[in-house]
Amino acid sequence: MRIVLTGGAGFIGSHLADRLVAEGHEVIAVDNLITGFEENIAHLLGNPSFSYLRQDITLPFDIPGQVDWVLNLASPASPIDYLRLPLETLRVGSYGTHNTLDLARAKGASYLLTSTSEVYGDPQVHPQPESYWGNVNPNGPRSVYDEAKRYAEAATMAYHREFGLDVRIVRIFNTYGPRNRVDDGRVVPTFINQALRNEPLTVFGEGRQTRSFQYVDDLVEGLRLLMERGNHQPVNIGNPNEMTILQFARLIIDLTGSASEIVYRPLPVDDPQIRQPDISRARDLLGWEPRIPVEAGLQRTIDWYRTLARRS
Ligand code: UDP
């Protein structure tokens, strides 16, 4: 297949590109590098099945020739990134989604939107099934991401209903692994790198809020199965293994053997207090469930950051 992959130089995009190229597909990665890194795809650049286009997808663009799939992964996704890039985040969720939907429509291609567990906001239903409509502050600081992704889902479904476009919507829960930028601000790279430097781990609030972390390879497997077996219904892909942020900080200290202490910092505005995916639909529809235990995935990730620290 010939596949356009936006956000192809990002953390998740570059892992998905690796998998698709390994399966023998042709990948055209599109990225404007506002949060992506060319280094993530440097190893693919000489491969004849891979090409890279530096392009802002909020502007109309064309890909010459046949296209079988448009996979839209482009967006700032870390809270510190989207709070620093509020208008870019709104634009990529709206204009960027329309431009990629138009590309899929013009090419007769199938379309996959990467949405997010953030569409559930600070949830009042736990764990979160896809049928839950969410509890989102429509104009708070996080709304630039949450509402952009909710809009992107609405646009994707409108193209499906209006034009019969073959679409998939995946709601990705917290994901970690190699290539997640050290300064990305999300809790996994932040805690691991603080622990490796024996610096204090910065727990926000009292650390009683929960998250459920999945390893990136499990997500990539879920995305491939969704492409093959999914339909237009949104599907949660995440690891239900829920823990508090304080437990997570202690786990990272344990796994790294660090001498770090824990310090407490203010909780960000509208930080969701609980989050856990209900993955019944992914199990039933795709036959998917996460396979990599959190300790094993974290160990691989810690090793990767250790190597990175030695190189720099
Ligand atoms: N968090 C934290 N310390 C940090 C970074 C994040 O305690 O240095 C918390 C944050 O408040 C949130 C959770 O960890 O409750 C996950 O944050 P992250 O930014 O990774 O992603 P989110 O799930 O909020 O999008």
Image: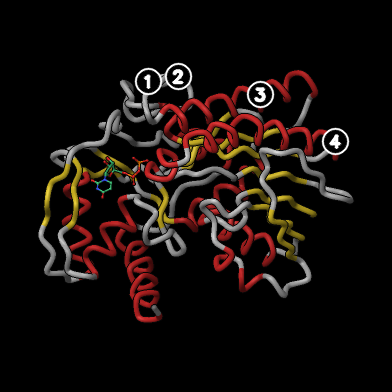
Between marks 2 and 4 in the image, the one whose residue lies nearer the viewer: 4
Badge nearest the viewer, 1 or 4: 1
Q: CA distance from mark 1 to mark 4?
A: 35 Å
The residue shown at (19%, 51%) is: 202
Q: Is residue 69 left or right of residue 286?
A: right
* Residue nearest the observer in this picture, 47 or 83: 83
Could you say whether the residue bearing mark 2 is in a helix, strand or loop? loop
Q: Which residue is mark 3?
A: 157
Front disc: 1 or 2? 1
Residue density around tag 2, few if under 14, some if 14–19, many if 20 or more, within 10 Å: some
In this rendering, position of residue 244 left or right of residue 8: left
Residue at the (62%, 37%) spot, across then down: 113
Distance between the alpha carbons at the discs numbered 3 and 1? 22 Å
The first of marks 1 and 4 along the sequence is: 4
State the separation of the CA atoms marked 2 and 4. Answer: 31 Å
Q: Which residue is mark 2?
A: 133
Labels 4 and 3 touching (C-beta < 8 A): no
Residue 69 % position (x, y): 75, 45
Q: Position of residue 59 (x, y in %)?
A: 71, 39
Name the kind of residue labelled 2 in the image: Trp
* 52 sits to left or right of 169: right
For label 4, the SS is helix
From the viewer's perspective, is 60 left or right of 174?
right
Q: Residue at label 4?
A: 106
Q: In terms of sequence position, does the residue under pointer 2 or pointer 4 come before the other? A: 4
Q: Residue at x 54, y 56 (%)?
A: 36
**Which quarter of the figure has residue 277?**
top left
Q: Which mark is residue 137?
A: 1
